[in-house]
Image: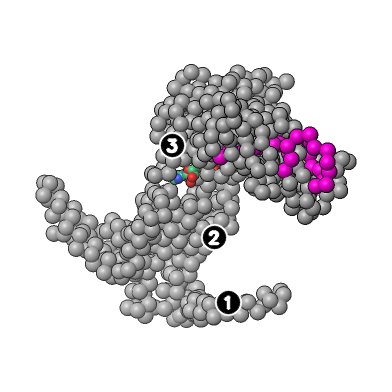
């Protein structure tokens, strides 16, 4: 079996990038552990590619330093950074066969011929394309081309592997297959991976930790679970998966604080006054019919605006005054709500999170 | 052919008619004349095969055409590269620069070169100021080449640019992140991908340079004639349509041979032949 590599440690210190008046990235600070799989997640234009390009050396940072294994590489030319990369949309060399493509980095790094052959075969086997070595890239399907791009990036076992939305051009089934493959390769190889995506499910499924970007700035860094359960601001909670959001106010109440709406009040630890938002994950919310009397927690009147069957559960889109979102219930439990029906949302107070609005970003990072 | 196709095919008729009347018919007439004038027989081709002056003229023409192709290719490549890799604004400006010569007639440009290259011309005046001996350029093949290359430049630049803008700009970056220094990334990735443009441009320039008349007539010497000037002499001065016809047929064969050669080279190098056409 293949030997493991020692993954590189990557550190970004106050990295920023300015394109004229556009701030593509600012104050980016990140420490990636050796062998870690980290995702940069954020909406379009949030600075993910820019950040990745600065690590690769395609863009020069306007400020800050980039370190690999404690060594400053900010001014080292691209070809001496010892980084592997999978580009969005493959970027295979169209004039070379699959084999020559995969062999290319090995050649540049001075491997001798038998070693090149062995590593090429191994990389192609890893992505199940052993038989396609002699083809030209144009003679492959999209998924196969993406696998060649993957094989080419891992062939010489770089200690750091960058991937920029490698699966975004593929359909869902292919994407999931390749996600499994990428995870397996990462495990086998032990290389450090920085993975760019705007798909939260993909980031959740693959990563040890996720870095959430918005408007060029890091919003939060954490494990998928941390981000999902403890988003540090409104943006992160909105962006990471579906949830119910309810607008309200935080008011001082005696010695503590309370989140206040005209349909319920909840005590909160958040030390803040002013507009706030309450957030509940879809699986923590229960839907009950409007006439039901059994209420243990807070309740909010809502209307069902859409209903989607997903596997064993039903997803309800609900809307209510000052809020709305998605509720997920098991099909066997509740399947009797119809679109347009008036319902009540209820949940255990402890399962909800309250986030102050406006100043939320700063508060989040301190916590 | 479907009815829709046959209906749209009508659109091609005017152009086809023009090609038929303006090209195929005269070529056929010349072909016929080359074996019938002044009397039926192969005497014109025998003349071409045995006359050493005719040989000199043909070899000189090929030699100049090859040189013109090489020189324009070497000069046009960096220019085209610059065009293909710069911003839209810079590219438009450079495009105007390339097309500028098209706005003046060949005649005017040839006279401009005379002013620059003649014995007491601009070039020698400048050289003289630095104490350099005056050069004899006007009336030589060098002057012809200079004049031709200047005119031919756009025909080389444009096909090159059209292929180069189609090259994914991330490919050289991909090569670099895989460990290739800048020059290797260029040589191993960008350059091979730009070759269809080089081939297309070379083909056009070579063929065009076989047909230059005004430039050699004004900048060259009558003792160093090229095929078009020899044709003129044969047909319009000596009224020998047959010999002129034979010379024209020989040129046609040469063009065909070059086409074939380039296509073979392209095939061996794995360059898609369709792409050469696509580059035009
Ligand atoms: N070369 C450039 N010149 C000017 N602005 C740029 C340039 N490259 C990126 N930007 C801007 O910087 C911001 C961040 O872009 P970036 O490509 O990093 O986004 P992204 O997070 O990768 O988005 P996507 O998910 O759409 O790929 C955007 O607003 C973009 O318009
Ligand atoms: Mg991007």
Residue B105 screen position, x and y as percent:
31, 70
A214 left or right of A339? left
Is A29 drawn above or below residue B258 in the view shown?
above
Q: Residue at x 44, y 81 (%)?
A: B38
Give the x, y percent position of residue A220.
57, 31
Q: Are marks 1 and 2 on the same chain?
A: yes
Q: Judge whether residue A320 is colored magenta.
A: no
Report which residue position mark 1 lands on.
Answer: B12
What residue is drawn where x is 51% and y is 35%? Answer: A359
| Percent coordinates x, y for residue A355 in the rendering | 59, 34
Location of residue B250 with respect to A133 vertically, above or below: below
Q: Chain of mark 2?
A: B
Q: CA distance from mark 1 to mark 2?
A: 18 Å
Please name the residue that numbered disc 3 is placed on: A17
In depth, the one of B13 and B133 nearer the eye is B13
Q: Which residue is at 37% across, 53% downward?
A: B90
Label 3, ligand 1: CB separation under 8 Å? yes
B165 or A98, which is in the foreground? B165
Q: Mark 3 or mark 1: which is in front?
A: 3
Horizontal side of A241 relative to A108 (left or right) equals right
Local secondary structure at mark 1: helix
Q: Is residue A282 magenta?
A: yes
> Callout 3: residue from which chain?
A
Q: CA distance from mark 2 to mark 3?
A: 42 Å
Magenta highlight range = A275-300
The chain under label 1 reads: B
Labels 2 & 3 near each other (Cβ < 8 A): no
Around disc 3, counting alpha carbons within 10 Å, would you say few (fewer than 14), some (14 to 19), or many (20 or more)?
A: many
User: Residue B141: percent from the left, percent from the top?
Assistant: 29, 58
Q: Is residue A260 above or below residue A76?
A: below
The residue at which mark 2 appears reads as: B277
């Amino acid at each position: 079996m293949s030997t493991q590599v020692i993954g590189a440690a990557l550190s970004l210190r106050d990295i920023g990038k300015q394109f004229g008046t556009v701030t593509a990235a600012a104050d980016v600070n990140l420490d990636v552990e050796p062998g870690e799989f980290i995702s940069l997640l954020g909406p379009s234009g949030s600075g993910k590619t820019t950040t990745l390009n600065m690590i690769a050396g395609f863009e020069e940072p306007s400020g800050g330093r980039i370190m690999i294994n404690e060594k400053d590489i900010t001014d080292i030319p691209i070809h001496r950074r010892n980084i592997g990369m999978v580009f969005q949309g493959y970027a295979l060399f169209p004039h070379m066969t699959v084999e020559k493509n995969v062999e290319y980095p090995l050649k540049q790094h001075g491997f001798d011929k038998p070693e090149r052959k062995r590593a090429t075969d191994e990389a192609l086997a890893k992505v199940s394309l052993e038989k396609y070595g002699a083809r030209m890239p144009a003679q492959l399907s999209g998924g196969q081309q993406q696998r060649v791009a993957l094989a080419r990036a891992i062939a010489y076992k770089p200690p750091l592997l960058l991937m920029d939305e490698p699966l975004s051009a593929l359909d869902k089934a292919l994407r999931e297959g390749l996600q499994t493959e990428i995870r397996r390769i990462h495990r086998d190889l032990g290389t450090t991976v920085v993975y760019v995506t705007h798909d939260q499910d993909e980031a959740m499924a693959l990563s040890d930790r996720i870095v959430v970007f918005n408007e060029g700035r890091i919003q939060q860094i954490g494990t998928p679970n941390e981000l999902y359960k403890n988003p540090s601001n409104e943006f992160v909670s909105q962006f990471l998966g579906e949830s119910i959001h309810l607008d309200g106010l935080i008011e001082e109440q005696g010695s503590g604080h309370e989140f206040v709406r005209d349909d319920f009040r909840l005590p909160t630890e958040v030390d803040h006054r002013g507009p706030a938002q309450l957030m509940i994950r879809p699986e923590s919310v229960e839907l009950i019919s409007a006439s039901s009397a059994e209420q243990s927690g807070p309740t909010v009147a809502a209307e069902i605006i859409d209903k989607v069957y997903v596997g064993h559960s039903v997803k309800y889109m609900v809307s209510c005054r000052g809020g709305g979102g998605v509720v997920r219930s098991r099909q066997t439990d509740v399947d009797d709500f119809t679109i347009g029906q008036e319902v009540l949302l209820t949940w255990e107070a402890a399962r909800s999170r309250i986030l102050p609005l406006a100043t939320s970003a700063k508060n989040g990072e301190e916590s | 052919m479907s009815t829709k196709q046959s209906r749209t095919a009508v659109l091609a008729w005017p152009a086809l008619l023009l090609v038929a009347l303006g090209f195929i018919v005269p070529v056929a007439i010349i072909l016929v004349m080359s074996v019938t004038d002044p009397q039926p027989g192969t005497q014109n081709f025998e003349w071409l095969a045995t006359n050493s002056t005719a040989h000199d003229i043909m070899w000189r023409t090929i030699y100049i055409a090859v040189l013109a192709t090489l020189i324009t290719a070497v000069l046009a490549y960096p220019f085209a590269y610059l065009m293909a890799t710069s911003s839209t604004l810079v590219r438009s400006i450079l495009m105007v620069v390339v097309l500028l010569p098209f706005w003046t007639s060949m005649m005017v440009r040839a006279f401009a070169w005379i002013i620059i290259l003649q014995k007491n011309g601009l070039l020698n005046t400048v050289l003289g100021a630095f104490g350099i001996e005056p050069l004899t350029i006007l009336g030589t093949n060098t002057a012809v080449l200079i004049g031709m290359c200047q005119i031919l430049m756009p025909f080389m630049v444009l096909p090159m640019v059209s292929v180069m803008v189609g090259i994914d700009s991330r490919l050289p970056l991909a090569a670099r992140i895989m460990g290739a220094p800048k020059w290797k990334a260029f040589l191993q990735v960008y350059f091979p991908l730009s070759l269809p443009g080089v081939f297309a441009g070379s083909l056009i320039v070579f063929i065009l340079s076989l047909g230059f008349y005004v430039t050699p007539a004004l900048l060259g010497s009558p003792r160093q004639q090229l095929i078009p000037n020899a044709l003129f002499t044969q047909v319009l001065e000596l009224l020998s349509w047959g010999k002129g016809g034979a010379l024209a047929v020989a040129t046609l064969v040469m063009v065909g041979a070059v086409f074939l050669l380039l296509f073979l080279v392209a095939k061996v190098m794995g360059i898609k032949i369709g792409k050469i056409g696509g580059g035009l």
